[in-house]
Image (tube, grey):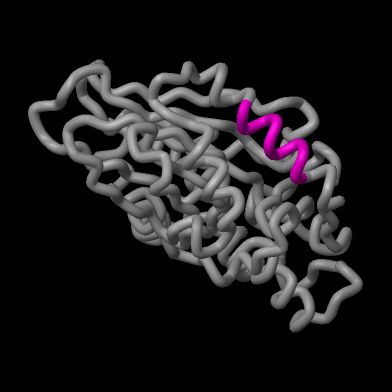
Amino acid sequence: MDHKLRSLYQPIQPTIRQSATDEVTYQEWLPDPRLQAFIYCYWELKTLQPLQADFSYRVVADGCMDILLELDRPAENFVTGLSTSYIEFPLGNTFHYVGIRFLPTAFPQLFQVDASSLTNKFENLGNVLPSLSRFLGQQLDQTQSIEEIKESLDRYLLQWIAKQAPQVDDRVLNALAVILKQKGMADIGSLDTGLSSRQLRRRFHYYLGGSAKTFSKVVRFQQLLQAKPSKESLKHNKIFYDVGYYDQAHFIKEFKHFYGLTPSKALQ
């Protein structure tokens, strides 16, 4: 797998907008260049001081799978599969999370795990990948800097890849590339992949956790976020037509499904 997928898809998590203060920070870091075909980023979400109220972390649909843990309890680590809608996690009023966001298809390639077994799930990593779960629990903690954490993750994952020789069906990657190049507006039924519709569906479920149609909808939604629209531009310029929504009601319904808020509230 080369870096083509990464160049075609940059998923957005508009997390920082969820906090009206400067008391919560979210940052992303690139992994080692040799990992960037598989891992979109490492990320950190933390409070800078105790909050007056509990924080609800909203994750919008992005087509990715994540591993995450809280640094003061690193042995309690988790994996999230493809989400077909937004999800929310109550985090309390103090927290320090780090995570690994995998590009679409990467998690099954690296770990030989059927992505559909984790779709819309928040699963203990120890139930899925015991050795990686143990490594995270034993090697990471809150005394480390993000640079030290990044180095540990890079080293472990590079060693893992060297042993596994990850592979994916090129026909799946080619179909995925078409969907991404056409910004989620490709005619799924006419994709020329060399696979039957049943074979393509099975492979998409294994490598992505959902159908090509579901992934296309997520890509279209993410494309809209990439455009960084304002409430005014949506109202006056109707830019949702440019990314394939056929009317305003359809756009609002799907946006709320993937984001958890209406566009007017999310973009204010």
Residue drawn at x 41%, y 59% as measured from the top left: 122
* Residue 179 seen by the camera: yes
User: Please, is residue 244 above or below residue 31 in the view?
Assistant: below
Q: How many marks?
A: 0
Find residue 99 and report its horizontal and vertical position in percent: 49, 38
- In terms of image quadrants, where is residue 26? top left
Residue 34 part of the magenta-drawn span: no
* Residue 227 seen by the camera: no
Residue drawn at x 50%, y 20% as measured from the top left: 146
Principal secondary structure, stretch drawn in magenta: helix
User: Please, is residue 51 above or below residue 181 in the view?
Assistant: above
Find residue 204 and report its horizontal and vertical position in percent: 69, 68
- Is 59 left, or right, of 216 in this rendering? left
- In terms of image quadrants, where is residue 196? bottom right
- Is 95 left, or right, of 208 in this rendering? left
Farthest right residue in view = 194
Find residue 44 and report its horizontal and vertical position in percent: 44, 28
Please tell me which residue lies in front, 223 or 78: 78
Residue drawn at x 74%, y 71% as measured from the top left: 203
Residue drawn at x 17%, y 33% as measured from the top left: 93
User: Please, is residue 258 above or below residue 52 in the view?
Assistant: below
- Is 73 left, or right, of 216 in this rendering? left
- In terms of image quadrants, where is residue 129? bottom right
Please tell me which residue lies in front, 124 or 249: 124
Residue 157 part of the magenta-drawn span: yes
| Residues shaded magenta | 152-160
Please tell me which residue lies in front, 50 or 75: 75
Quarter of the C terminus within the rendering: top left
